[in-house]
Amino acid sequence: MIKKLAIGLVIFLNSFLSFKASAQTVAIKKPAEYKTSWQRLLLQLSSSFYTAARENEVDLDSSLIYCARSYGLSRLPVIAEGIDVSGLTGQLNWIDKRNPENGLRLLSAAAGKQHLELLLLLGAYYAFEPDEYHRHKDSVLYFLNKAVSESNILHEQQLGRQARLLIGKMYVDGYDFKHGDPIFDQLVKDCRVAGDRITEAKVWFYRGLYTGFTPVTAPKRIAYLEQAQKLYHQQLNIEGEISAITDISYLNIPIYQLDKAYKASLQALSLVESIRFPFIQYNTDAVAMVTTFENKFGEPLKYSLETVQVAEAAKDSIGLIGFYSRIGQLYFTEDIMSGEGQKWLRKAVNSSIRKGYDMFLYPNLYSLVNSLIASGHPDKARDLLVKAIKKAPPTITIDKLYYNMAYTYCYLAEKNYGAAEKYLAAGNSSEQQLEKHGDRFRHAFITAAFGDLYFSKGDYGKARVIYEHFLSDPSRHGGGLVSELSVLDNLIRIDSTQKDKTSEVRHLRLYKKLADSSYNVAKTRQAEELQVKYATAEKESLITLLNQKAKLEQVNLNRATLLKNVTIGGIVLLMVIVVLLYRQSAVRKKSNQIITAKNELMARLLTEKEWLLKEVNHRVKNNLQTVISLLESQAMYLENDALKAMETSKHRIFSMSLIHQKLYQSEDVRTIDMSVYLPELIKYLSDSFDVGTYINFILEVDPVQLSISQAVPLALVLNEAITNSIKYAFPGKKRGELYIKMWQTGENIELIIKDNGIGMVQDTELADIDSLGLKLMKGLIDEINGQIQFENNNGTTISILFKIDLLIQKVPFLNPEG
């Protein structure tokens, strides 16, 4: 009799039988009819399940696309989380149609915050495309880096953090931890400084969910998800907490932390039930899966039954076949020849073949083939295998593993050891590929198969060594008691043949211990089946009670109809009161019209005031230009110091004139954008002094907005400082650089003017400088309550610090048209 091992059946591929309880199941609506947070939760749970079931050979982004299509949902709840898309209703179909060209057309027509949000959506679209790191890295970085820049300009820092989060997701998903980890580390710090707990929770969640899987990264990912779970809990975000805990449960299994996985799966299930989330099948299956790996029977059976009931009610096409097969695997691992196991495994296999392909096909096919061989039907096993391969040949590594192992045992049954060894070697190669991804669940499975090969060939020495390795491998528990009993039975036969009494006694004791455990499992199964039957009868009694309650409610409905008729009289009386209220409303409406007229008058007055201010600035600018023209005319008759003084005055007047020019050209007549003003001032001075190319001007000027009361003094200071550098810092037109930087930090404005010329005179104390230009600068900075410092260090550095005029921040600009 063939002694088969079920050790390696993958955690999510061991599925489960449908339990057809006669009690009615609560109707589940279509997923799209539920609120957005529940749609997001369903997509996250199903895509995590699908990726785990496919042993990470299908990434989370591909799983999200598949699950969204299966449920008829948009990916937007996941992709656009944290982005306000309410203003783009009906315009985002391009995301699920995977047609970003339409998104680009929307982007070209957008402006302001909506432009920023569309940049984020396009970046998120590419960041959630399969294999985004290798295929779409340039697009992700292009859109999201532009989003970061625009978020700084628009002061939308939260959206900027969203963009950086998506960039980090792309890097760690592509195993580029060198670039991804620093982004996440800095994001956590920035979120905490800004008090942005919502984005911080998402940072931890994305880092834990999308970091590439290896045995080394698994504990880190669990720690990240635990941080996310704590923050979600504090924010009362139960859906986010469920997703984080469910993934914690999944990640603890590959590192054999089954107790932690079990606790996490129960906690997630409890939360799901607390919010009455209807799609609980992925959480009940998680508990069933963990308890199956713990070699339990009753508990996984209980949760598997519940899983199938919900999955059938929800018409779940993603995992239903897998859920069907779990019950078959439970019976199979208890008794390889179990008729019940064959019944439900066959149901799962036939469903997969009818579907054309399913991720659970080959694991179930392997189990069914071995069960048929052990039951004395090797021909039926071979026919079933050929039929399945013809309909759906294996494509991915996990399918190839079970395909080769099924043929291995077929040939062992025929005693064709050469062919069996060939297929076993191919299966071993597939298992080694899976181990590269951190999956060692089937290591003992392959080990036992080699032992079976040598045992069947009569090479008992090699078989003994291999079987002993199997018994020390922790992954053997995945195959249940039947696999270990089979190995021990063969070892006892080897001991008897080789007359090794000591080993035979040791192996007999182990066999008896496991056999007693197997007997207890069988009893537990029987008790569980009785409990299920009792629960079914109890549900039927509940339905009868509900029917009686419905009849009583019908009587109450008739009484309610009578009450409704009486209520109509009250409504008539109410209408009279409404008429009186309407008259009062008409009076109030007339008053509102008067107020509206006054508001419109104020708006017109504000508009006229704005134009008057612009006209004043325009005329001031023209007057200053006239003064400049007069000075230029007078300069024709001056020489030497008088001419220089005249030129200096002209430059000072131009710097003020340019201020007024910018004011009347601007929509906002209150402020000057220094990032626009400074380049024009420098161009004017450069042209005036014929600088040419011997001085390189370097500008780093943020879009700082200053009121005219601060802009004019600062413009004069800039004029003096730049003029001095041009005239004196580079004698003989020596090449050099003039660096100007201006930025705002909170309420403070900082300005640095630095050249790498000859510097100021060394033997003159700065405090005693009596130059008119320097005195003018100090006086002007005092006028705006600022500080100015001069420093000689490889040139002259002038540092200015002052506080921004708070009035332009606290008093908003009134736009009468807005």
Image (spheres, grey):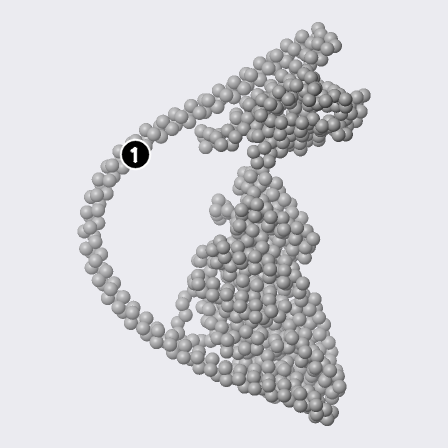
Q: Is residue 182 above or below residue 221?
A: above
- Amino acid type at circle 1 is Lys
Q: Is residue 585 left or right of residue 370?
A: left
Residue 69 horizontal/vertical position (percent): 53, 60
Q: Nearer the viewer, residue 111 or 358?
A: 111
State the image quarter where residue 540 is shown.
bottom left
Q: Is residue 344 visible?
A: no
Q: Is residue 700 left or right of residue 33?
A: right
Check the picture and name the quadrant holding the N terminus.
bottom right
Q: Nearer the viewer, residue 641 or 627?
A: 641
Q: Is residue 672 above or below residue 361?
A: above
Residue 22 horizontal/vertical position (percent): 40, 76
Q: Is residue 138 above or below residue 481?
A: above
Q: Which residue is mark 1?
A: 589
Q: Is residue 40 left or right of residue 253?
A: left
Residue 817 horizontal/vertical position (percent): 45, 30
Residue at 69 percent across and 53 percent down: it is: 178
Q: Nearer the viewer, residue 508 or 680?
A: 508
Q: Secondary structure at mark 1?
A: helix
State the image quarter where residue 497 is shown.
bottom right
